[in-house]
Amino acid sequence: HRDSTINAVILVGLILAALIPRIVLALQLDMVTDEVVYILGGKIYLPLLRHLSIGASDWMYNYEHPPFVKVLMGLALAVNGLLGHPLGELLAARVPSIIMGTLLVVAVYLLGCAPFGRIIALIAALCLAFSPWLVYFSALAYLDMTMTALVTIAFLLLWPAIQRPWLYLLAALCVGLGVASKYTASLAIPGMVLFTAYYFLAIRPRMPEELRPRVPWLW
């Protein structure tokens, strides 16, 4: 019970430590060049998705970047509109990045405790919470923070997935959404495959048979 209380306090602290500077900076920053492009993309893509117009030519707008984050921006703008525009358009479009930047901090702590220990995971999460560059990119309507959060979560899921193979599906989903956020996320895939192959082909055979996890592709 005491351990659960400590974890809850740490999580609340991390959420506040990550959320507050990101919101403050998002309120202060003027619109950055690429934000105009991505926000307009969100406005174009969401109606297409709503009407299942998959073959429409409007999808070609900003085709050099995948659509997932821009759809999230469009969704944030739509929700903001339904609520009566409590946020300005720019701040509403930045909400997905703020949320994903905060989620990244929380995920590093939660998923990092098992392989690295609570202290290391907490230090890592705090470093991410207060990193000037991460705070900056979390406060912009950009693609980078969503991609970074999803790929990092996917990588960290590989450790618990050793004992719970169904988590490989969740890791694959995160990688897929990461690539659908920005194509450079695909560069993480070889490292994930290499870690999984090394564990099951090099480490697992040396373990006592009763401690060996099940091979995921035979699960």
Image (tube, grey):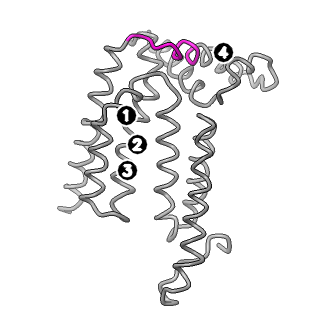
Q: Is residue 37 magenta?
A: yes
Q: Between label 4 and label 3, give the one nearer the viewer.
A: 3
Across and down, in percent, residue 159 comes to 47, 64
Q: CA distance from mark 2 to mark 1?
A: 10 Å
Most distant residue in the left direction: 2
Mark 4: amino acid:
Ile
Which residue lies under the disc numbered 4?
44
Q: CA distance from mark 1 to mark 4?
A: 28 Å
Q: Tell me whether circle 1 and circle 4 mark residues in contact (CB < 8 Å).
A: no
Quarter of the image for the C terminus: give it.
Answer: bottom right
Indicate the quadrant where residue 167 lies: bottom right
Most distant residue in the right direction: 55
Classify mark 2: residues with Cα within 10 Å, few (<14), some (14-19) or many (20+): many
Quarter of the image for the N terminus: give it.
Answer: bottom left
Q: Nearer the viewer, residue 174 or 85?
A: 174
Which residue lies under the disc numbered 1?
134
Checking the image for residue 104, the label placed there is: 2
Mark 1 lies on a secondary structure that is helix
Mark 3: amino acid:
Val
Across and down, in percent, residue 68 comes to 61, 31
Mark 1: amino acid:
Leu
Which residue lies under the disc numbered 3?
108
Indicate the quadrant where residue 75 lies: top right
Indicate the quadrant where residue 121 lies: bottom left
Which residues, given as a range, are shown in magenta?
Answer: 30-39
Q: Between label 1 and label 4, give the one nearer the viewer.
A: 1
Mark 4 lies on a secondary structure that is helix
Q: Pick whichever of labels 1 and 4 is earlier in the sequence.
A: 4
Residue 149 versus residue 86 in the image, above or below: below
Whether residue 50 sits left or right of residue 151 in the image: it is: right
Q: Tell me whether circle 2 and circle 1 mark residues in contact (CB < 8 Å).
A: yes
